[in-house]
Image (spheres, rainbow, N blue to C red):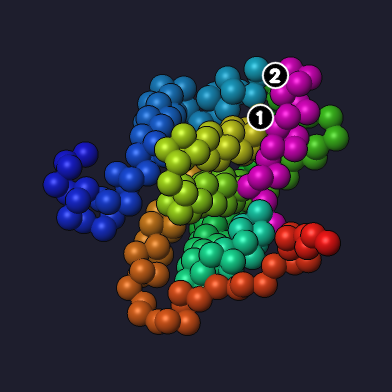
Amino acid sequence: MDLNFSKTSFLGKVIWENRNFFIPYLLFSFLFLILLGIYGNAQLFLHVNKHYSGFADFLFYYWTNLGDGIIAALLILVLLWISFREALTFLIITLLITIIVNIFKDHIYPEMNRPVSYFGTSQLLHLVPGYNPPILSTFPSGHTATAFSVGLYLSIIINNKFAKFILFLIAFFVGYSRMYLSAHFPADVVVGAFIGILITLVCYFPGRLVKSAWMDKRIKYRPRFFARQQTV
């Protein structure tokens, strides 16, 4: 990235300061797009899904929940202790992602079925015991969109460079888990990640422009459990 651009542009500055998140994201996205061009959506899914183990079954069965909407809701609550600006900004991000993903699934591509429906009862699929993959409305992946929006937003407000990379890995493996669990195709995951990142960046900038003393306030209440114990 042009260093002058990163210093003068707000978007460039955000991307440059979070390059430990964006660089691996761009590399993996580029790789998946190449593989999609070579193998196609269905065959690439089978290549991913056929590599499994008992440990991975257990891990991704629970890991995929990190892309659930409850995680975004919890982050909104936590951000209230940082500032109302941060909490409101991420609330808007979450609502927009939810609306956009559901428009794609229910109105633009409602006929696009998930792997279980696409392949039927084929023995080609690895299904994790105890997990029942959805059947309809595959495109795009809402879990992946949520995971990448949460990961990027945390990356923006956290200064530690290593933590930014870890946040990318967490989001990436949520996307991977959707394919592993036969819940989504690779294209669903790639586009879901893109939507999560795009909406986060688009909403973050206007959130900085609003000048309001109230927006910069935060909840100061500390639950008694976290209150410092008084010594006798």
Q: How many marks?
A: 2
Determine the residue positioned at 53% across, 25% down: 44
Q: Residue furthest front?
A: 232
Label at residue 52 = 2
* Magenta region: 53-70
Q: What's the residue type where badge 2 is placed? A: Tyr
Dot 2 lies on which element?
Answer: loop
Indicate the quadrant containing the N terminus: top left, top right, bottom left or bottom right: top left
* Residue 86 visible here: yes
Q: Residue furthest left?
A: 4
Q: What's the residue type where badge 1 is placed? A: Tyr
Q: Nearer the viewer, residue 1 or 223?
A: 223
Q: Is residue 126 left or right of residue 155?
A: right
Q: How far apart in space, not on screen, are marks 1 and 2 (Cα)?
A: 8 Å
Give how far across and how far down residue 4 sits, in percent: 14, 47
Label at residue 17 = none
> Tags 1 and 2 in contact by the CB under 8 Å rule?
yes
Q: Is residue 47 above or below residue 127?
A: above
Q: Is residue 225 above or below residue 28?
A: below
Determine the residue positioned at 75% across, 38% down: 62
Residue 68, magenta (yes or no): yes
Determine the residue positioned at 66% across, 45% down: 66
Residue 179, magenta (yes or no): no
Q: Residues within 10 Å of mark 2 (few under 14, many from 20)?
A: some
Give how far across and how far down residue 160 sits, in percent: 45, 41
Q: Is residue 112 left or right of residue 206?
A: right
Q: Is residue 58 above or below residue 51?
A: below
Q: Pointer 1: what residue?
A: 180
Give how far across and how far down residue 136 sits, in percent: 68, 48
